[in-house]
Image: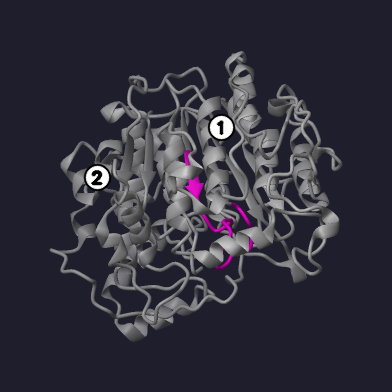
Amino acid sequence: MSFATYQPKPKPTKNASGQLAGARFASSSLEMGRQMSGNPVDSLHSLSSLSLASSAVTSEEKIMSFPPQTSSLLHLFYDPILSQTHLPANGTEYECPERVKVIYDHLKSQPNFSHDYLEFDAAGIRAGDGRMLSPEDLEIVHGKRYIDTLEEFKDLRPEQLRIAELKYENDVYVHNTSFTAATICASGVLECCRRATHSLGGSRTAVSISRPPGHHACQNKAMGFCFLNNVAIAAKISRARKWARKVLIIDWDIHHGNGTQELTYDDPNIMYLSLHRQGVGSNYFYPGTGMPHETGGESATGSNVNITWNQRLMGNTEYICAWSELVLPVVHKFDPDLIIISSGFDAAKGDLIGDCLLTPECYFLMTRSLMTVLNRDRTAVVVALEGGYNLSVIPLCQEAVSMALKGEEWDEDAGVNPLSQLSSPQPQPKSRIALSENPLVRARLLLNKYWDYYEKNDRQRGKKLSKGACNSVNKTIRALVEIDFFKSIGLRQVKEQIEQKAHGTRKVGDRKEGRGGKGGDYLDEDALDDMFGKMNL
């Protein structure tokens, strides 16, 4: 892949359609939960004049110099106004205002919260050296007419809101405060990037607990609960302001971030990597996009990676396999200055939409191994909330990610994660990890509870990777291996018959008929169901 200077061209808006299964939306004229002194959008400060052209830099150009990580503290953006704006009239069990509040309240309840987090809100952005985004700033990825339309929401009457909602094909609800909330959310993600890249407080990690999500938002279209593409905006502005030369966006939301792919597809200095369910026809899964052969535009071949699951009930083993075989070596090779994780938790067991089986431990392991393979003195990591709709599950998943970002160890006995008690923790052989100076090797070894990349463990192993998951990983590998950028990585196709350790798994012959469809065995669903039942999920 070339990182030469280029002039990106705005991509035409895609006309992807469809709706999230069972979603219910309605317009609203409800008053906000608390009085706001004026419209926050009216007082947003403007960033310096930015353009897509100014965001292009060569691989030889230098970014601003910032100090290395010296603290395990974690920047945290959360503003209570985000749970009191962008309100659905009749309620929704999906993208509801309570999502951010339950996550924040759970983190806040931890005994070391005040010592572990550098917390800030929208007022904190304005009070510091950061700036809230103006409508003009948003045009770095979105069209002016589209932004103007979103701004007009605040002046619409209830019947006008209902009419406006009709054009979004039933997967977006609108409110007078929708644009306000979306702008605050996008500003929070950007400020997380500024603080992490600048090592403010000695920390190069940050988390944004904010809504509405953004990865479905296209250049000129709102869809899938999303209005503004928070991560694409943050990535483009971070490069334009020389906080980072190369940005990697990792999207582990169960839905493909079609908007993020569209907005970064022709940029060789922004890599988009997504793990998601994908299906068309009778196997349709929203939004039906994100194929393995889509590897980037003509000037950015190799900058787009899609790992697609074509079946439901993907679990820890499937994700950890893809992470070890594909994600970690790609991250190691790309060597970004900034990583933004589009962190949807709708692949977690118990989600209302995703129908997959990830436990919080899996999110911890993915994050922890990612931090291991990075150059911690140079690479900043920002986690931005996307989807995830089970209010009892998403706080635990976010806590697991935060633990990994802070460098904490996984402790099942501490009551942190009741969802991962399928098996006792299997400590890594310290000598194996300590003796390796290669960060990629060390990162992969952290994952061998679920996927032993080096196949050197002699213990009895009874799990085989499902045929469907094996095919999914290999499709992406085949799409990448002929691209120059990936040739030196040594990607290898996964063998279907590789046996994996039996950690909470069930042999193929023991699986119940009709659960999971065709394609192999998965995590022990009965054990998971039992634990979720005890949690009243």
Would residue 344 be counted in the magenta stretch? yes
Would residue 93 be counted in the magenta stretch? no
Dominant SS in magenta: loop
| Percent of width and height locating residue 499 | 81, 39
| Percent of width and height locating residue 62 | 42, 19
Occupied quadrant, residue 313: bottom right
Side of 511 relative to 273 (left or right): right
Q: Which residues are magenta?
A: 340-358
Relative to 170, say whether 469 is above or below. above
Q: Which of pointers 2 and 1 lies earlier in the amino acid sequence?
A: 2
Q: Secondary structure at mark 2?
A: strand
Report whether residue 297 is seen. no
Relative to 142, say whether 58 is above or below. above
Side of 113 relative to 351 (left or right): left
Q: Amino acid at mark 1?
A: Ser
Q: Amino acid at mark 2?
A: Phe
Side of 245 relative to 135 (left or right): right
The residue singled out by tag 1 in the image is 369
The residue singled out by tag 2 in the image is 120
Side of 277 relative to 133 (left or right): right
Mark 2 or mark 1, which is nearer to you? 1
Circle 2/circle 1 CB separation < 8 Å: no
Q: Nearer the viewer, residue 287 or 445?
A: 445
Q: Nearer the viewer, residue 471 or 71?
A: 71
| Percent of width and height locating residue 379 | 45, 27
> At 40% from the left edge and 22% from the top edge, which residue is drawn?
63
Mark 1, Cα crowd under 10 Å, few <14 / some 14-19 / many 20+, is: many
Mark 2, Cα crowd under 10 Å, few <14 / some 14-19 / many 20+, is: some
Q: Secondary structure at mark 1?
A: helix
| Percent of width and height locating residue 86 | 34, 68
